[in-house]
Amino acid sequence: MPRYFLLFCITLFSAGLVSAQETHTRGWIEHARVMPDRLLMSAKLDSGANTTSIHAEILTDDELREVAAEQSFAGQLADTESDASAMMSIKMMDGPAPDDPSGEEMESDEDITMTDDMPDTITFRLTSRGGKDAIFTAPIVRWVSIRRRGGGAITRPVVLMELCVAGRMVSGEVNLADRSGFNYPLLIGRNMLSEAAISVDSRQIFASRRACPKDA
């Protein structure tokens, strides 16, 4: 085989690898949908965070019975694109709430050994930007510890979720947290940014006008 032909083949192969690993630049705030319910949320994309975190209300058995008595969430309409269009006017969230803990908390990726009486599954409620609710029950993949630099720690359950983030479908581990004190209910960390081949441009917000590739 001629040497120049071999070099030509290697070049083509390398180009194919680059194409397959193409990155997609997005802003530091983007649209996201939680699948399969398509709940629309504003998300902060943060390459400085190891993992993805979402604001979730963990439901007790009593709360589940109350929800079942009040209404069924099955068949509830997802947020429309008009809801997403309204988000486009947002330049930055108002109010005193911070974007994130700003160094007050440090996340550990190490699994925590739990006692045998810890649940295998968890039921939680998510609320969209438009105020629509959906209830999820998911297996707990693992637990993570959030160590506060001032001392003490809190424990969070981790579940697998599928998201549409700025036009990119991605699935992976998400820890369920109380993010009520922060501006953005959804924090997309490196685990999902890497999986979705997304790079973050801190100079932009809403670089993608759609949360999902086929939003109508």
Image (cartoon, helix red, strand yellow):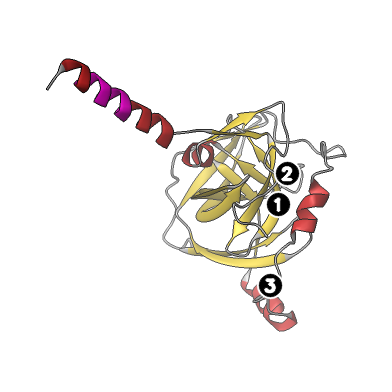
Secondary structure, mark 1, is strand
- Disc 3 marks a residue whose amino acid type is Glu
Q: Which amino acid does label 2 sit on?
A: Tyr
Q: Residue 63 carries which label?
A: 3
Residue pointed to by mark 2: 184
Quarter of the image with the C terminus is bottom right
In the rendered image, the quadrant that contains the N terminus is: top left
Q: Please, what secondary structure does the residue beneath circle 2 have?
A: loop
Task: Report x, y in % for residue 138.
Answer: 51, 63
Question: Is residue 7 covered in magenta?
Answer: yes
**Residue with the most extreme left position:** 1
Give the quadrant of residue 201: top right
Q: Which mark is residue 16?
A: none
Query: Callout 3 environment at 10 Å: few (<14), some (14 to 19), or many (20+)?
Result: few
Q: Do the residues labelled 2 and 1 touch (CB within 8 Å)?
A: yes
> Which tag, 3 or 2, sits closer to the chain's start?
3
In the image, which is nearer the foreground, mark 3 or mark 2? 2
The answer for how far apart the CA atoms under marks 1 and 3 are is 24 Å
Say whether residue 215 is left or right of residue 17: right
Q: Is residue 63 above or below residue 157?
A: below
> Which of the labelled discs sits on residue 41, or is there none?
1
Q: Residue at x 70, y 45 (%)?
A: 209
Nearest to N terminus: mark 2 or mark 1: 1
Query: For the magenta stretch, what is the residue range?
Result: 6-13
- Please say if 99 is above or below 81: above
**Which residue is most to the bottom?**
69
Q: Distance between the residues labelled 2 and 1?
A: 8 Å
- Residue at 75% x, 64% y is 132
Q: Main secondary structure of the magenta part?
A: helix
